[in-house]
Image (cartoon, rainbow, N blue to C red):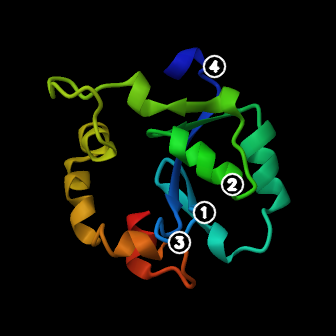
Amino acid sequence: MLGGKSPNCRIVGVGVHYTNEDEPPQMAAVLQLCVEELCLVYHIAAATKWPKRLTEMLQHEKSVIFAGFNIESDKEKLKLSGMEINPNKFIDIQRKWRVPYTGKEYDSLIDVAATVIHPFYKGMKKKINTQEDYKLWGTSPLQDNLIEYA
């Protein structure tokens, strides 16, 4: 039971990618929501408004717990983009779980994914140019390699 929450809740993984930091204010550009092997990649930067049902789910859904990684910046950028995830239902995995025997104060998302899900994830960062591609999350249409990375 993660964070003392009910075992009847569905865990939804949350990831947020931001607009280019060289063009302030930096805001949320992409929201990814994942359940098991299904992943919704919502391109906030290309949307004109938040879908009503998505807003309801993020803020009021009782049977969902959202789990992210190092979520403080994600919460801040989502708020700047006009959205908040219910803080009582949003858990920071980085603060709740450690990869055994790494000796690190905080593990990276890659460390956790490779340990918990599959070693395949160790190579994910090699699939994109983190210096250049990270500047493109706010551009439309979203590039295929970024969708796959998300």
Q: Amino acid at mark 1?
A: Pro
Residue annotated with mark 4? 6
Residues under labels 2 and 1: Cα distance? Answer: 9 Å
Residue annotated with mark 2? 80
> Within 10 angstroms of label 2, few (less than 14), some, or many (20 or more) residues?
some
Determine which of the numbered discs, if any, sits on residue 23 in the image: 3
Residue annotated with mark 1? 25
Judge left or right: residue 133 versus residue 5.
left
Residue toward you, 13 or 96: 96
Please report whichever mark, 2 or 3, sits nearer to the chain's N-terminal start: 3
13 vs 31: above or below: above
Location of residue 104 (image quadrant) = top left
Please report whichever mark, 4 or 3, sits nearer to the chain's N-terminal start: 4
Please report whichever mark, 4 or 1, sits nearer to the chain's N-terminal start: 4
Q: Amino acid at mark 3?
A: Glu
| Residue positioned 20% across, 59% down in the render | 123
Q: Secondary structure at mark 1?
A: loop
